């Protein structure tokens, strides 16, 4: 059976164009969910009567709860993906996330918010884990960079879904709905995205790409232990470090750049919150997004031309410089800062793409789900560290400090990658081709 080349990606035997297109649609929905909660939740907290001070505390608590669930579940989802197949886990993730979002809009108390957020987190963990695992299964090793770059590009498109959803409550209120009903309908629409994504994933993803290990001969705990032991391989360990910084970079920019600009605008420029958001925060975030578009394509190409370890070196080195440079920003509204944010977008998506290409290349086929599950755990720890630790630094030592902290972390990974590359590991070494085994109907 000859392999197929599509969108510049060499697909493994058994994977067709329709499978890749179904996967990219699932990625679009999954990445849309990634930012939807943070932009929709504030309105919901307001309409159910939670005071401003408590809103901040509840938001932090719910975010931390979700990341803890990610840390617990990602490895387990990876093992089950190796046992029963990626298609089932991805479908479960999208459908469970959809149910969680639909229920979330009906919340009337903090206890209900917690319960429904747990459902969202359980689904999102499976969804995020399979985003990385499936593309590792589908692409030949020589095309992993392009495949992950294109995935990053689709995910960037998905980042436009949350702002669109955020416009719906006001539209519904203008049409005569109450604020409460408008929130419920908006969350229900967000939930419907996942139902469509789950149907496409179940019907469209390949039934043959991936690995089913001898599940009946190994317990789940044994599979987890063996998957974790793979971190002894230098390249896999480095990929975990790269996952930590790449997800942390994204979290720091998403959580604190807009906050910095809104606070600066309201305190120093006599702007209202909405004016500061429209005039300062939106252009800045759009500049980061433009950088991410450029970086996803650029690093996807570069990762296929040089070793994946060297790609991580370039990405982490660039991110170290840019994030540390935020220390010199006193006025974030200066025009030159937009140029810095453009390069920041390139740097953060480059770290994201290169880390995924590295773990996809390095993970042994029979343990790929478990290894990438732990890769996801490392990313979740990075996000938790960025949001919780970065928030404390932002409040106590200034808005630039979370960026500088992750500049330092990126520098550590930069040095680490030089040591791994110095071991003279070639691109052919520690490389594990995808096995083609049926995953069931």
Image (tube, rainbow, N blue to C red):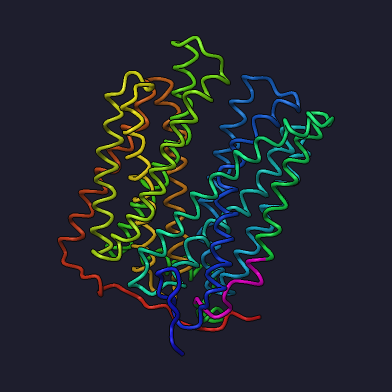
Q: Position of residue 244 (x, y in %)?
A: 38, 48
Task: Please report the residue visible at 36 percent of the width from the left and 35 percent of the height from the top.
Answer: 341
Q: How many marks?
A: 0
Task: Please report the residue visible at 71 percent of the width from the left and 50 percent of the height from the top.
Answer: 191
The residue lying toward the viewer, choosing from 291 and 220, is 291
The residue lying toward the viewer, choosing from 414 and 346, is 346
Task: Please report the residue visible at 50 percent of the width from the left and 14 percent of the height from the top.
Answer: 266
Using the image, determine if residue 227 lies above or below residue 247: below
Outermost bottom residue: 1
Using the image, determine if residue 437 lies above or below residue 395: below
The residue lying toward the viewer, choosing from 264 and 55, is 264
**Start and end of the magenta stretch?**
200-210
Is 205 included in the stretch rendered in magenta? yes
Q: Quadrant of residue 29?
A: bottom right
Quarter of the rendering occupied by the C terminus? bottom right
Q: Position of residue 327 (x, y in %)?
A: 28, 26
Q: Position of residue 70 (x, y in %)?
A: 54, 51
Task: Please report the residue visible at 50 percent of the width from the left and 82 percent of the height from the top.
Answer: 14
Is 17 included in the stretch rendered in magenta? no
Q: Quadrant of residue 104?
A: top right
Q: Position of residue 313 (x, y in %)?
A: 24, 53
The residue lying toward the viewer, choosing from 101 and 244, is 101
Using the image, determine if residue 386 lies above or below residue 275: below
Whether residue 344 sits left or right of residue 162 in the image: it is: left
Whether residue 273 sits left or right of residue 237 in the image: it is: right
């Amino acid at each position: 059976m000859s392999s197929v080349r599509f969108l510049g990606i060499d697909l493994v035997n058994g994977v067709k164009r329709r499978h890749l297109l179904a996967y990219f649609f699932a990625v679009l929905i999954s990445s849309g969910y990634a930012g939807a909660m943070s932009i929709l939740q504030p309105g919901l907290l307001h309409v159910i009567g939670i005071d401003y001070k408590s809103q901040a505390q509840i938001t932090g608590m719910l975010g931390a709860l979700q990341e803890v669930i990610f840390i617990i579940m990602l490895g387990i989802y990876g093992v089950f993906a190796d046992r029963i197949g990626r298609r089932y886990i991805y479908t479960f993730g999208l459908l469970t996330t959809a149910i969680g979002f639909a229920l979330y809009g009906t919340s009337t108390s903090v206890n209900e918010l917690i319960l429904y957020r747990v459902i969202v987190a359980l689904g999102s963990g499976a969804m995020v884990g399979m985003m990385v695992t499936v593309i590792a299964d589908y692409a030949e090793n020589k095309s992993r960079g392009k495949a992950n770059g294109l995935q990053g590009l689709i995910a960037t498109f998905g980042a436009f879904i949350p702002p669109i959803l955020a416009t719906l409550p006001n539209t519904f209120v203008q049409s005569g709905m109450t604020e409460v009903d408008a929130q419920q309908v908006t969350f229900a629409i967000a939930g419907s995205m996942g139902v469509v994504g789950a149907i496409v994933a179940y019907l469209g993803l390949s039934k043959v790409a991936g690995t089913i290990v001898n599940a009946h001969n190994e317990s789940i705990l044994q599979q987890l232990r063996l998957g974790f032991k793979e971190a002894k391989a230098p390249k896999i360990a480095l990929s975990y470090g790269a996952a930590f910084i790449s997800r942390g970079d994204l979290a720091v920019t998403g959580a604190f750049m807009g906050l910095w600009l809104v606070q600066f605008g309201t305190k120093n420029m006599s702007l209202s919150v909405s004016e500061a958001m429209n005039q300062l925060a939106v252009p800045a975030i759009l500049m980061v997004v433009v950088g991410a578009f450029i970086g996803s394509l650029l690093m996807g190409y570069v990762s296929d031309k040089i070793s994946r370890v060297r790609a991580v070196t370039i990405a982490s080195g660039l991110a170290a410089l840019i994030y540390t440079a935020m220390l010199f920003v006193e006025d974030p509204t200066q025009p030159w800062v937009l140029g810095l944010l453009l390069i920041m977008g390139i740097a953060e998506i480059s770290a994201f793409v290169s880390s995924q290409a590295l773990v996809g290349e390095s993970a042994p086929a029979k343990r790929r789900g478990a290894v990438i599950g732990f890769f996801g755990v490392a990313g979740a720890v990075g996000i938790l560290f960025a949001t919780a630790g970065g928030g404390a630094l932002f409040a106590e030592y200034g808005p630039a400090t979370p960026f500088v902290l992750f500049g330092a972390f990126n520098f550590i990974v930069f040095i680490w990658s030089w040591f791994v590359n110095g071991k003279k590991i070639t691109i052919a070494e520690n490389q594990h081709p995808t096995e083609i085994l049926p995953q069931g109907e």
